[in-house]
Image (spheres, rainbow, N blue to C red):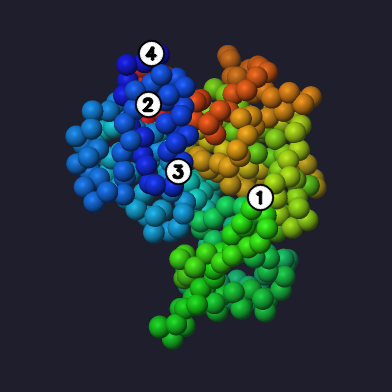
Amino acid sequence: MISEKILGIVSINDGWENYYINACKDLNVKFVVINLLADDWYNIIKEAKIDGLLIRPSGRNETMKHLFDERLFCIDKYLNIPMYPSYMGCLLYENKRMQHYFMDIYDIKHPQTWIFYEKIDAIKFFQRYSAYPLVSKPNLGGGAEGVIFLNHYKQAKHIANKVFTQLKFYNPGIRRWRKYKHLFKYPVMEDPQRNYLIIQEFIQAKWEWRIIKIGKSYFGHQKLSDGHHFSGSGKVGWVKPPNELLLQTKYISEKSGIRAINVDYFETQKNEYLVNEIQTIWGGKLDYQMLINGEPCRYVEKDGDFILEYGIFHKNKGCNLRVLDFLDVLNNINSTPGGGK
């Protein structure tokens, strides 16, 4: 037994909790599974004899996203139970609006973004904007779901007419399309985008970098284009990540208090780096997230340096590292509260 701590594992019946369960079994850590969707969820957690709560925030749809944000807020504020990821990490997860606000506040370079909640404001912007194309994105959705390229004013106006309620009663919205095993796409019927627009400048990127940080472990690789998108392409460039991106990811982690974090960066044609997304849960089924010279590896931060270590370090989608880092936080909760509260 590496710890006498008892961890609660949040379950929402999507199977992801199994990665945390397998990690706890691998590490011989005691755990209980807690259903956050239960009607009496608050009393269940309040009465559970746990030292901390392992979270997999939901990004299935906006309703589930709101449910998680509300219930985790109550846990964070009123139950005083440390959570991993932190509440801020869960709030930023699958929330492009909050990510934009966060990056603006901390002056983190990212594509220029405009968010509209009124149709008239969006139309006026589209009329005066002269550097098309633009990119429209939904607040929630990965793998380029719901991303629409707006090549001219008429196309942008058409999107605004679909998104915003017309005559106070009709709103078709925009539906995201999801890939099924790279065979075909199908519409996500339960969650149309309505009454807001997230618009970004179009970035002519060479590729995208994915940098992952879990505690003091870092991984990085390129996300290559399928001819249309980087996200969801399934194409990976296994090359050494730039040190600049490791340092930037460390900065974002420290400012947000998110100890397990994934930051995707565009590398532009001018060799600049712009943050595309910040997440605390990421895809990837492999037991490694970085290869150098064909060998699985990671960087470990030690005394301000990044030390390369070879081996398999991303078991159970990184949950082994998450559990170890959370235990380290719990064992030092008075001096390092960032991973919980």
The residue under label 4 is which amino acid type? Met
Q: Which of the two discs, 3 and 1, sits closer to the camera? A: 3
| C-alpha distance separating marks 4 and 3 | 26 Å
| On screen, residue 54 above or below 176 | above
Q: Amino acid at mark 2?
A: Pro
> Mark 4 = which residue?
1
Q: Which of the pair 76/55 is nearer the observer?
A: 55
- In front of the other: 71 or 8: 8
Name the residue type under label 3. Gly
Above/below status of 118 relative to 313 = below
Asked whether the residues under the numbered discs 2 and 3 touch, taking CB atoms below 8 Å apart as contact, a structural biologist would say no
Question: Which labelled disc corresponds to residue 337?
Answer: 2
Numbered badge on residue 231: 1
Question: Which residue carries the number 3 mark?
Answer: 15
First of labels 2, 1 by sequence position:
1
User: 12 above or below 166?
Assistant: above
What is the C-alpha distance between the residues marked 2 and 1?
A: 33 Å
